[in-house]
Image (cartoon, rainbow, N blue to C red):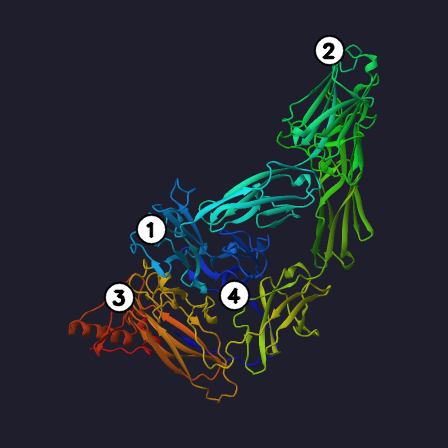
């Protein structure tokens, strides 16, 4: 462990720069909301446990330059959690009052366009416990009987929970357990995985009639308390039975108020009654339910259908009975005329047969009745006027009037009247005229209207002329183009496959290009002649202006440079005789016409001058209009990109103010003229007034060059909004903003404790100049495959769930490799004496294994110069236990803690452990070491020394590096 002390002095505002390469994103997830625990899963991801109803708050911490864009997504384990939105573009994911369905795996994705996006995930496990429910069942074949003696009864307790629930049964005050009563069995069905617990009462005895309590528990995890349910079993206990006090089906008239009554005819305890509709369909909104009574006022045809009464008392299966509500009504009246089928002629002729058919949908169908009138007088069936009806059970109902051997006197108006036997709804009358003018339809398209050309956005009428009597309804549909996929169904403008027209006109408003194609009009076979449909085709061509790209783009250029602008044609109709026209503002630059082989046009600027800045437009035109490409040519500089990964960006050395190291790079600095300066604007977040100044720039800024400007005299604890605007000889460029937040770290240190339980590591950080890093571990995440006999089996408190910082010192570590862990910066109290206060630095360490190197503590103080002072060091195996070390330090400036272990063997070589060596061996080793130190000759491998003192064996394993004086100075070597 190395202690590093940093002293920060007040700096004047200054600017410096260095080169920094862009960096791909990295990401980690930390939590800041309510949680029960956070565990590590070695082969998957972290698991965050939270109680249902609490607030989930996860923060995605990213690094990388340019600043990565963050996106939260969720998959697996539940439905999307943010009101239908499955993603969130923010560094913080917050879900208040989290529900069980919002558990699952959450991903944080950071992307800045460099390399692959960085993705980290965390699984959110929502814990909950619902109230348990006890249900009672009898053995198979006896479920409809009461619970007599010598019957087997099952009491099942079910509670939805996460984690799996533990059940306890009580009979009265007696706790039941397996084997405690020969007449009772308790078991968990294999396939329920602990989600149900069944109490089996074999051959009911008098003592089995009692109050039973099921207690469900998740063992107080997340503070979730136990819950219970109670059931009283007696000799009257029975499943529910019900009866309906209404007719089935119940036929009613529209507008009436209906009442459905359901009563329980049996069951103990008394059952609960409810009304439902099949398929989960909701009850009518106007309906009212009170107990087993359902009332529906002003019933409509749409309210008709099946209604079910369900009774449940948690004994046996629920009882269910249904009834159907039929609302009287007549709908969809139609007719058709069928000429004599024995002659190949669609016309009605004297002496031949003709049939008039009438069809109506009725509810209920058995109440439908038809009558016929001729010229307003009742018509009865006769030898020449034959009236027939279809079966009343067939819907829709149809009646036919066959006129045999049509005579001139049969001409007239025939009326089909449909009514319901018991009334309740108006009757439907359909008039059909039979005369010499009754002829089959003829369908034509007006001259010049079979091929229509319209422009996008117009209103266009497609018309088919129909003659004949009676005039049939015209059906419109679209015709698939030849060669197109048969599966692709072309829809009409209203989204349907077919539209009806009574006047033969199909009107399309705001016509679009996808409505181009062939349309079919045809006569229907109802409300007219029942003959082969007549049809005609109309071709619709929708012209639209050219579609071009880019529609708008911004081009940044420096003065004196050459560049080209390109406008591309994607599609147009018509695609012939296309012209283009280039302008700068209102000034015409050039015009021309497209050739058949070309689909773009270019404009070249040889050397940009000040008058060349502005908006360039290219209009490509056809008969339908113009498509425009717009290019804004500007000399504005791109926005700077703030660097968010500055090490120790914030410093504080006076009680009331702090400083901040502001760093940024310039986006595409060579795209425009040289940046002459930056305009810096800064204001307190709580105020509206801006303070501004210019930061002059010398020389040319390179791409990726990191620029620095130190801000001082910032008032604690205020946050500031900083705005940075580049300036060229063209003028001001694009500005960018960021917020600076004051985050003190123990400004006047009195006590600081860290157990590494939070993934943020109490703001400890890894040194970027060492050879490898510390990792955060706990005993449950320890990989015994690689550290079977060395890693700690718990943290220093004995907990296997507790965390600690860990390094692996065996292979592939090389001799001399270092891993440094830096603490937060601790500031000195301004009122302290010049010698500085004294602090006690205490920590626990676990150094066990044959490859253990050295563990060091340093104090680094940063004044005019940086000094590192060793304050504690320990080498070698210290046994398989945690030990505590305490070090007194007296810093005179701000300081940090740095943990630095060092490996002390050569790669590929194993240390040699000696027992009680002979004196000659020790003398030989002593001689080699002294020769190494004196002559600075470095033997390939040195194997080492021990001193037995107080029955402890201190072993030092040294390699070539032991000969370096800077190492020897800090090592005491003992000889027997």
Mark 2 crowd level (few <14, some 14–19, many ≥20, 10 Å Cα): few
The tag earlier along the polypeptide, 3 or 4, is 4
Q: At which x and y percent is residue 79? A: 54, 51
Residue 224 in view of the camera: yes
Q: CA distance from mark 4 to mark 1?
A: 54 Å
Q: At which x and y percent is residue 542? A: 76, 36
Question: Which residue is nearer to you in this view: 150 or 72?
Answer: 150
Can you tell which mark lies on residue 205?
A: 1
Q: Which residue is mark 3?
A: 911
Above or below, 863 against 721 in this view is below
Q: Which residue is mark 2?
A: 343
**In this rendering, which labeled residue sits more in front, label 2 or label 1?**
1
The tag earlier along the polypeptide, 2 or 4, is 4
The tag earlier along the polypeptide, 3 or 1, is 1
Residue 37 in view of the camera: no
Can you tell which mark lies on residue 525?
A: none
């Amino acid at each position: 462990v190395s202690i590093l002390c940093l002293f920060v002095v007040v700096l004047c505002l200054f600017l410096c720069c260095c080169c920094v390469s862009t960096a791909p994103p990295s990401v980690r997830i930390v939590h800041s909301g309510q949680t029960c625990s956070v565990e590590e899963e070695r082969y998957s991801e972290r698991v965050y446990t939270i109680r249902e109803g609490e607030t989930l708050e996860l923060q995605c911490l990213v690094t990388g330059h340019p600043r990565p864009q963050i996106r939260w997504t969720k998959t697996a384990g539940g439905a999307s959690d943010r009101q239908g939105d499955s993603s969130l573009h923010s560094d913080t994911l917050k879900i208040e009052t989290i529900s069980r369905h919002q558990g699952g795996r959450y991903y944080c994705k950071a992307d800045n366009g460099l390399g692959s996006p960085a993705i980290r995930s965390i699984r959110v496990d929502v814990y909950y416990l619902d109230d348990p429910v006890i249900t009672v069942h009898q053995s198979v074949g006896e479920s409809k009987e009461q619970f007599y003696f010598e019957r087997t009864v099952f009491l099942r307790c079910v509670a939805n929970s996460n984690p799996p629930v533990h059940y306890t049964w009580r009979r009265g005050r007696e706790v039941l357990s397996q084997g405690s009563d020969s007449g009772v069995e308790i078991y968990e069905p294999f396939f329920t995985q602990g989600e149900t617990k069944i109490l089996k009462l074999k051959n009911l005895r008098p003592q089995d009639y009692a109050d039973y309590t099921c207690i469900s528990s998740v063992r107080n995890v997340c503070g979730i308390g136990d819950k219970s349910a109670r059931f009283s079993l007696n000799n009257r206990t029975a499943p529910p039975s019900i009866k309906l006090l209404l007719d089935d089906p119940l036929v009613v008239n529209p507008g009436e108020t209906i009442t459905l009554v359901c009563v329980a005819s049996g069951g103990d305890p008394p059952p609960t009654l409810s009304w439902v509709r099949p398929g989960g369909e909701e009850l009518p909104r106007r309906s009212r339910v009170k107990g087993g009574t359902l009332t529906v006022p002003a019933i409509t045809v749409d309210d008709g259908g099946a209604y079910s009464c369900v009774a449940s008392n948690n004994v046996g299966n629920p009882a269910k009975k249904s009834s159907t509500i039929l609302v009287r009504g007549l709908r969809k009246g139609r007719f058709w005329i069928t000429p004599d089928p024995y002659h190949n002629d669609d016309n009605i002729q004297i002496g031949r047969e003709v049939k008039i058919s009438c069809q109506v949908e009725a509810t209920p169908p058995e109440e439908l009745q038809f009558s016929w009138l001729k010229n307003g007088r009742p018509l009865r069936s006769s030898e020449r006027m034959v009236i027939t009806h279809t079966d009343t059970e067939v819907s829709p109902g149809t009646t036919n009037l066959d006129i045999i051997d049509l005579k001139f006197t049969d001409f007239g108006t025939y009326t089909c009247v449909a009514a319901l036997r018991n009334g309740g709804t108006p009757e439907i009358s359909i008039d059909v005229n039979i005369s010499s003018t009754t002829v089959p339809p003829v369908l034509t398209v007006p001259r010049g209207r079979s091929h229509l050309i319209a422009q996008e956005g117009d209103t266009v009428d497609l018309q088919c002329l129909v003659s004949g009597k009676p005039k049939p309804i015209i059906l419109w549909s679209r015709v698939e183009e030849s060669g197109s996929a048969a599966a692709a169904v072309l829809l009409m403008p209203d989204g349907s496959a077919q539209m009806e027209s009574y006047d033969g006109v199909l009107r399309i408003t705001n016509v679009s290009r996808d409505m181009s194609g062939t349309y079919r009009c045809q006569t229907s076979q109802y409300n007219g002649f029942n003959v082969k449909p007549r049809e005609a085709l109309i071709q619709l061509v929708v012209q639209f202006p050219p579609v071009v790209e880019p529609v708008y783009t911004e081009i940044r250029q420096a003065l004196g440079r050459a560049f080209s602008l390109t406008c591309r044609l994607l599609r147009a109709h018509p695609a012939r005789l296309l012209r283009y026209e280039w302008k700068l503002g209102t000034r015409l630059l050039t015009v021309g016409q497209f050739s058949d082989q070309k689909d773009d046009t270019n404009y070249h600027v040889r050397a940009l001058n000040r008058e060349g800045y502005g908006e360039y437009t290219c209009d490509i035109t056809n008969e339908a209009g113009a498509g425009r490409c717009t290019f804004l040519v500007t000399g504005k500089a791109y926005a700077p990109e703030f660097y968010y990964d500055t090490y120790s960006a914030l410093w504080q050395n006076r009680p009331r103010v702090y400083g901040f190291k502001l760093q940024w790079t310039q986006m595409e600095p060579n795209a425009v003229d040289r940046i002459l300066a930056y305009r810096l604007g800064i204001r307190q977040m709580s105020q509206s007034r801006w303070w501004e100044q210019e930061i002059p720039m010398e020389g040319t800024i390179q791409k990726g060059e990191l620029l620095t400007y130190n801000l001082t005299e910032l008032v604690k604890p205020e946050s500031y909004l900083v705005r940075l605007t580049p300036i060229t000889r063209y003028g001001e460029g694009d500005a960018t903003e960021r917020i600076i937040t004051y985050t003190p770290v123990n400004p006047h240190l009195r006590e600081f404790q860290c157990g590494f339980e939070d993934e943020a590591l109490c703001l400890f950080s890894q040194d970027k100049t060492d050879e490898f890093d510390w990792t955060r571990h706990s005993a449950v995440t320890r990989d015994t495959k690689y550290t079977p006999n060395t890693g700690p089996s718990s943290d220093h408190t004995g907990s296997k769930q507790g965390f600690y910082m860990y390094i692996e010192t065996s292979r592939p570590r090389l001799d001399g490799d270092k891993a440094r862990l830096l603490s937060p910066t601790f500031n000195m109290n301004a009122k302290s004496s010049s010698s500085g206060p004294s602090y006690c630095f205490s920590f626990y360490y676990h150094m066990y294994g044959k490859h253990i190197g050295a563990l060091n503590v340093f104090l680094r103080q940063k004044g005019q110069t940086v000094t590192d002072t060793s304050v504690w060091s320990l080498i070698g195996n210290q046994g398989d236990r945690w030990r505590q070390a305490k070090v007194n330090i007296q810093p005179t400036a701000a300081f940090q803690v740095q943990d630095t272990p060092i490996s002390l063997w050569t790669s590929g070589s194993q240390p040699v452990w000696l027992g009680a060596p002979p004196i000659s061996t020790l003398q030989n080793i002593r001689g080699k070491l002294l020769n190494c130190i004196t002559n600075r000759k470095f033997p390939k491998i040195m194997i080492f020394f021990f001193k037995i003192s107080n029955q402890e064996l201190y072993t030092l394993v040294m390699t070539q590096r032991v000969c370096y004086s800077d190492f020897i100075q800090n090592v005491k070597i003992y000889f027997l």
